[in-house]
Amino acid sequence: MALVFHKFDKIAKSLQKGPIEVGIKGLPRIVLNQATIGAMIFVLRTFTSVAIFLGTTTTYIIAYLFKNKVQMEAAKLPDEYMALGEEPSIDFIILCGLVGITITITIAIAGFSALRRKGQVVLQQSGEKLPTSLIAHLYGRTTLAGIVIIVIGCYPLWALVMNLIWGFAVVIPLPPSLVTIDLPGTDFLLIVMFGVISVGVAFAMTSPTIMLTWRGLMMSFRQYMENRIVHATSITLMAIMLGLFGGLITMGLLSSIGEALFPDMFH
């Protein structure tokens, strides 16, 4: 999804900043540009929906197969192998989740910084030549597509980190006071944890479409300001719509006033 958006964003940026011909001769290109932006937004929305569905389905299948494999292997181990004798409290699980999120975000920031430095080095080495490296395109300069890829990648990374944390808690004997810890403000910690997750999902899935929509609006504003035919047509359509809207309101208002003043005549 992010790679498709990266390509679409380059096209939308060129359309947004491209020249706009005045008069009637500029209308065909204006219509074509509007249709192109609309088609890209539609494709990106559809692709995002498909990506969410396929990603969720694939994750569930892999997790299901992995869980069955782990259960089969765990059944072969002696009972005393598992060191986590106490039933872990919800507070301990939430604490592990917050620790996992913190580690994941730290790794993501370090990874983004490393990719950014690598992308800048590739850009400097390419000089005036157009770089073909995907790292240079996505991270040589700060791009939304590169950030989206990092955010999306945080979720499987978080799952891996959580498995490592939980495996450590199972294999290494932990003090019962830690496993059964009772934290104050657990509800707040749970809200923080799911808040971070929700913000990341919302950003990764909606920001590309919002960016394309914003570029389309900026292109439409330029067309409105620089092409007199579009300017006049837009004002005319707004005046017609305002008149129709005002007429409907007036009709309803007059009917309401008539019913209030002359109830026998308005049934």
Image (spheres, rainbow, N blue to C red):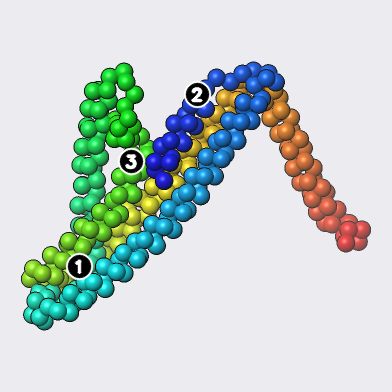
Question: Looking at the picture, does residue 125 appear above or below residue 264?
Answer: above
Q: Earlier in the sequence, mark 1 or mark 2?
A: 2
Q: Residue furthest bottom?
A: 79
Query: For the residues marked 2 and 3, what is the alpha-carbon distance in whole angstroms?
Result: 23 Å
Disc 1 crowd rating (10 Å Cα; few below 14, some 14-19, many 20+) is: some
Which residue is under mark 3? 147
Q: Position of residue 80 (x, y in %)?
A: 8, 80
**Residue 256 falls in image quadrant:** bottom right
Q: Position of residue 181 (x, y in %)?
A: 17, 70
Which residue is under mark 1? 92
Left or right: where does residue 222 sit relative to residue 191?
right
Residue 141 appearing in the image = no
Query: For the residues marked 1 and 2, what is the alpha-carbon distance in whole angstroms?
Result: 53 Å
Which residue is at 14% across, 79% downward? 76
Which residue is under mark 2? 17
Which residue is at 12% across, 78% downward? 77
Query: For the residues marked 1 and 3, what is the alpha-carbon distance in whole angstroms?
Result: 31 Å
Secondary structure under the numbered disc 3 in the rendered image: helix
